[in-house]
Amino acid sequence: MTIDMSVEIGGLKLRGPVLAASGTFGYGTEVPLLERRALGAMVSKGIFLRPRAGTPPPRIVETPSGMLNAIGLQGPGVEGLIRDYAPQWAQWDFPVLVNINGETAAEYGELAARLDGVAGVAGFEINISCPNVEQGGLYFGNDPRAAAAVTDAVRKRTDLPVWVKLTPMVTDVGVIARACEAAGADALSAINTFVGMSIDLTTRQPRLSFRTGGLSGPAIRPLAVHLAHQAARAVSIPVIGIGGIMRADDALEFLVAGCAAVQVGTATFVSPNAIAQVHDGIAAYLASHGFESLSDLPRYLPRD
Amino acid sequence: MFLVEAPLVARREVARGMFVLSLDAPQIAQSVRAGQFVNLGWSPGPLLRRPFSVYRTEGDRIEVILKAVGGGTEQLLAMTARDTISCLGPLGHGFELSPGPRSVALVSGGLGVAPMPLAAREARAAGMGVTWVHGARSVDELCSEADGDQQIWATDDGSRGFAGTAVAAVPDADLVLACGPNRMLAAVAMRWPDAQVAVETYMGCGTGVCLGCAVPLARGGYDRACKEGPVYRAADVEWSMLPVHLPYAISS
Ligand SMILES: Cc1cc2nc3c(=O)[nH]c(=O)nc-3n(C[C@H](O)[C@H](O)[C@H](O)COP(=O)(O)OP(=O)(O)OC[C@H]3O[C@@H](n4cnc5c(N)ncnc54)[C@H](O)[C@@H]3O)c2cc1C
Ligand SMILES: Cc1cc2nc3c(=O)[nH]c(=O)nc-3n(C[C@H](O)[C@H](O)[C@H](O)COP(=O)(O)O)c2cc1C
Ligand code: FES
């Protein structure tokens, strides 16, 4: 029996529920070992309007069951992306969403406007884990008004699907989720990395040159499942679960907790074919439990 | 690039605490070039893979050389025959050794010896005379295996060969290849801007997708040690921005 694994998320029909997470898959032109048939969609490395050099090394450090990264959103800027990558994406049989970043709400809007209509760009994932220079560096994602303002700025400039990627560094993720939904988001990605720090006792300095970094990997999974679940309960648009997914059972936890799809990040570093293994494992679970399609999987979403 | 579940087939000690592991990884053994590396994973083990230069190949086997510097390398050295290690590789861009130069000096400090046996093989195939220059703090930390038409040893304490650094012991050659502590490679860059050097960085993926392995460039910006590197023209790297405290780097 073949299982129907397709899902529809915020205006995009995907052949499967397992997506490549931003920043862990480059622009999709590497990772030759991945069986791409299993890839529902790809979210590109985060991009700004202008090129960015990124942070000095060390940018990565391993921590218990996880890793911290401070890449500093190194990237070619929007024109480089349009020239070098979008033409390739246009040939692929899965959609590519661009993870967009900015220092002001207007910058996010401009970025979306520039990319709207470019062949190969199927939609946007707004990274709101960026400091807002107009608000003293407060993260957009920490303030429901700023998060809504960014969503609105992008929504006004494009008809393509707009997903908003939530930050876990908030007191109530439901409040931010609802603000983004009200501002016109088609879906939410939950969640981005947790801010963390690790100290080298030889140098008595932070291990990362940037001092802090984003924690990803299995260490964050239970936190991420809970946040994705809270977000899913707060809104009626689809939520895409992200955080520490290494195998199919991990992805199924997010799906049962109310997510429509998942993204796999750090696991791709460990095993270049992780996305296909997660995809196939979900299908095998559904088959062995008598479900004919992913949409038949019961979701645990009490509305109390 | 291949992903191979490779049985560990042999292990030998080549200096105090320094071991060579042989792994059965046919596709990698047959395609690897000097200066390329493999990213090793095992379970139970650390979350991320660990990068190692390919030291030698023999038939279907690849060899890696290492010392225990942390949890991962300790676990690798505690493995026994027929334990399997997942090998991803060959990765990165290695040394450029096409015919032309008549002589090459292979300069290594400590574990920087790792890419040199394959470099010696390719240099000879390209018609070069090979001078092997290997240094360490003292005689018991020198890798006992050497190659080349001429061999030069250097120790900081003078317990074998030249008393001083490997870099100071290098004779004239048309081409210089070097690997070792970042401090040593910075010295190589001052003396031979065109030398080819193999650098090390922390790595997230080894396959070019995470941008974790940034190498600062003299012309500004960064590129990826795992993709454009790990071998660079010495003068192209901005040495002052590379961390000098990595342990592979201090063992010379
Ligand atoms: C391209 C490349 C080729 C390499 N080739 C060899 C080789 O042939 N032989 C060899 O012994 N080592 C080599 N290294 C270094 C080796 O990868 C690290 O020593 C190893 O990953 C440490 O793992 P660990 O779990 O033992 O250390 P951890 O417990 O993770 O850390 C212990 C110490 O090692 C340092 N460390 C961790 N990862 C790295 C890394 N990627 N590079 C340098 N230092 C690190 C940490 O700062 C810490 O001080 C290479 C590195 C690169 C990037
Ligand atoms: C090296 C690295 C780079 C990342 N870059 C981005 C980025 O550019 N934009 C973004 O929204 N998230 C970025 N992320 C976060 C991931 O997309 C994902 O939300 C997070 O890693 C948690 O998932 P995981 O545990 O499966 O990795 C990055 C993560 C890592 C590890
Ligand atoms: S280690 Fe990930 S890009 Fe080089």
Image (spheres, grey):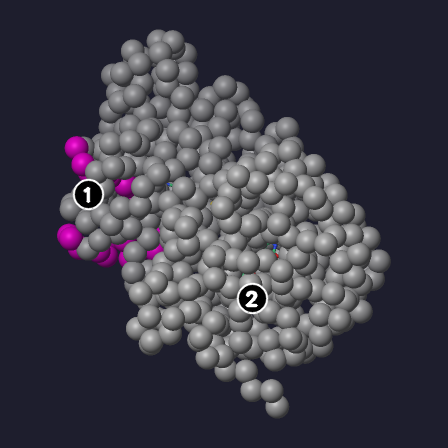
* B165 vs A77: above or below: above
The chain containing the residue under callout 1 comes to B
Q: Residues within 10 Å of mark 2 (few under 14, many from 20)?
A: many
The C terminus of chain B lies in quadrant = top left
| Residue topped by disc 2 | A240
Is B199 situated left or right of A209 in this image?
Answer: left
Residue A88, position as x, y percentages in the image: 55, 37
Q: Residue at x 72, y 54 (%)?
A: A159
Residue B92 seen anywhere in this rendered image of the structure: yes
Locate residue B62 relative to residue A199 in the image: left or right.
left
Q: Position of residue A235 (x, y in %)?
A: 66, 76
* Number of numbered discs on residues: 2
Which chain is disc 2 placed on? A
Dot 1 lies on which element? strand
Looking at the picture, which amino acid does disc 2 mark? Ile
Q: Residue furthest bottom?
A: A304
Disc 1 packing (10 Å; few <14; some 14–19; many ≥20): many
Q: Quadrant of residue A163?
A: bottom right
Residue B100 at x, y = what percent? 38, 9
**Numbered badge on residue B24:** 1
Q: Residue at x 50, y 40 (%)?
A: A29
Using the rendered view, name the quadrant where residue A130 is placed: bottom right
B206 to A214, vertically: above or below: above
- Specify the segment rendered in magenta: B59-82
Q: Which quadrant does the N terminus of chain B fall into?
A: top left
Residue at the image point whose x is 46% and y is 50% from the top? B204
Confirm or deny contact between disc 2 and disc 1 (CB under 8 A).
Answer: no
Most foreground residue, B233 or B150: B233
Name which residue lies at 38% across and 71% down.
Answer: A292
**Dot 2 beta carbon under 8 Å from ligand 2:** no
